[in-house]
Image (cartoon, rainbow, N blue to C red):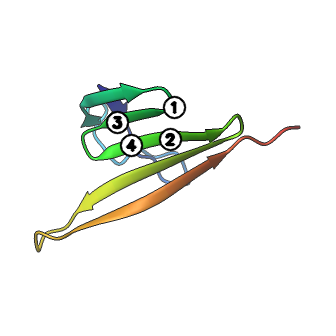
């Protein structure tokens, strides 16, 4: 289970103190992890692409990329 808590840019939580958005683990592969509605793919040692499926009130769904890149300091 992946637990996610959203925060505003001022670090104010969107969810109540004890609440999280929960993503159930579906499958683990060599360079990928799949949760219900969310997947992460290791593209190389410095990049991970996440894809989240958003469910809309009209019943439609859209998929959105969340790109992570390691920044060396």
Q: Nearer the viewer, residue 55 or 34?
A: 34
Find the distance from the CA under tag 4 to the CA under tag 3: 4 Å
Separation (CA) of disc 2 from disc 4: 7 Å
Q: Position of residue 60 (x, y in %)?
A: 17, 71
User: Which one is in front in this view, the residue at disc 3 or the one at disc 1?
Assistant: 1
Q: Are marks 4 and 3 in contact (CB under 8 Å)?
A: yes
Instruction: Find disc 3 in the rendering and name its residue.
Output: 34
CA–CA distance in space, label 3 to label 1: 10 Å
- The answer to whether 7 appears left or right of 42 in the picture is left
Assess disc 3: are there few (<14), some (14-19) or many (≥20) residues with their C-alpha within 10 Å of its C-alpha: some
Q: Position of residue 49 (x, y in %)?
A: 54, 48
Classify the position of the N terminus by image quarter: top left
Residues marked 2 and 1 touching at CB (< 8 Å): yes
Look at mark 1 in the image and give the residue it sits on.
31
Within 10 Å of disc 4 (Cα), the crowding (few <14, some 14-19, many 20+) is many
Q: Which mark is first along the chain, 1 or 2? A: 1
Label placed on residue 41: 2
Marks 3/2 in contact by CB < 8 Å: the verdict is no
Location of mark 4 (residue): 39
| Image-based side of 47 in relation to 42, left or right | right
Quarter occupied by residue 13: top left
Residue at 42% from the left image edge and 52% from the top image edge: 51
């Amino acid at each position: 289970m992946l637990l996610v808590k959203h925060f505003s840019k001022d670090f104010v939580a969107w969810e109540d103190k004890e609440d999280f958005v929960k993503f159930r683990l579906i499958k683990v592969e060599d360079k990928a992890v799949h949760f219900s509605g969310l997947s992460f793919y290791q593209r190389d040692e410095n990049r991970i692409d996440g894809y989240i499926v958003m469910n809309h009130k009209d019943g439609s769904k859209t998929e959105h990329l969340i790109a992570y890149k390691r920044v060396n300091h």
